Amino acid sequence: MKKNIFLISCILLPVLQAFSQNAIYVADKVKVSFFSEARIENIEATSLTASSAVINATSKDAAFKVSVLSFRFEHKLMEEHFNENYMESDKFPYGIFKGKIQGNDDLTKEGKYNVTVEGTLEVHGISKARTFTGVIENKGGRLYLDSEFLLPVADHNIKIPNDKLSNISQTIKVTLHAEFFLKK
């Protein structure tokens, strides 16, 4: 009996391991930028630090976390207003997205894929279902993700004072570029 269990284990274990292996890609470079057209002065900022991202190319799960405080502006006063008055970064320190890449593309194989990702985006303490599009390229064992999308500030309860409404766009253009390595 022990011999049969050992034989079955030797046969099934490699099969089970093959099914349980996931291709997990972890970002080592993430750049998130946003732009808002304004009458007096455009508002733009970039985060190159304090971001993390993971893609499971097997299950197609994706997750991103960006520190709101990591965004850098050309003008320090604008950065201060962004964190204190609009984003309330002390109360809501992160933007978080969790979702699933749609479709049947095998992201573990080299190629360029137009992707749609459906999930939940939490910004300013408000979670909303979102669908984003982008391009993922698998090249040289790495994944490269590029996406651009519009984000209405009202959807996330980001208050713009009445005296600034005519100066600040109600929709923010967000640009994302991330580079991932295969975690072993």
Image (cartoon, grey):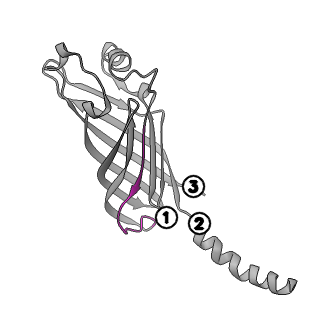
Query: Could you say which disc has been placed on residue 58 in the image?
Result: 1
CA neighbours of label 1 inside 10 A, class few (<14), some (14 to 19), many (20+): some
CA neighbours of label 3 inside 10 A, class few (<14), some (14 to 19), many (20+): few
Check disc 3 and report the residue beneath it.
183
Check disc 2 and report the residue beneath it.
21
Range shown magenta: 96-108
Q: Quadrant of the N terminus?
A: bottom right
The residue lying at 27 percent from left, 45 percent from top is 148
Classify residue 10 by image quadrant: bottom right
Q: Are marks 2 and 1 in contact (CB under 8 Å)?
A: yes
Q: Nearer the viewer, mark 2 or mark 3?
A: 2
First reached walking from the N terminus: tag 2 or tag 3? 2
Classify residue 138 by image quadrant: bottom left
**Residue 7 image point, x, y percent:** 78, 85
Q: Amino acid at mark 2?
A: Gln
Q: Amino acid at mark 3?
A: Lys
First reached walking from the N terminus: tag 2 or tag 1? 2
Which type of secondary structure does the marked residue at label 1 adopt? loop
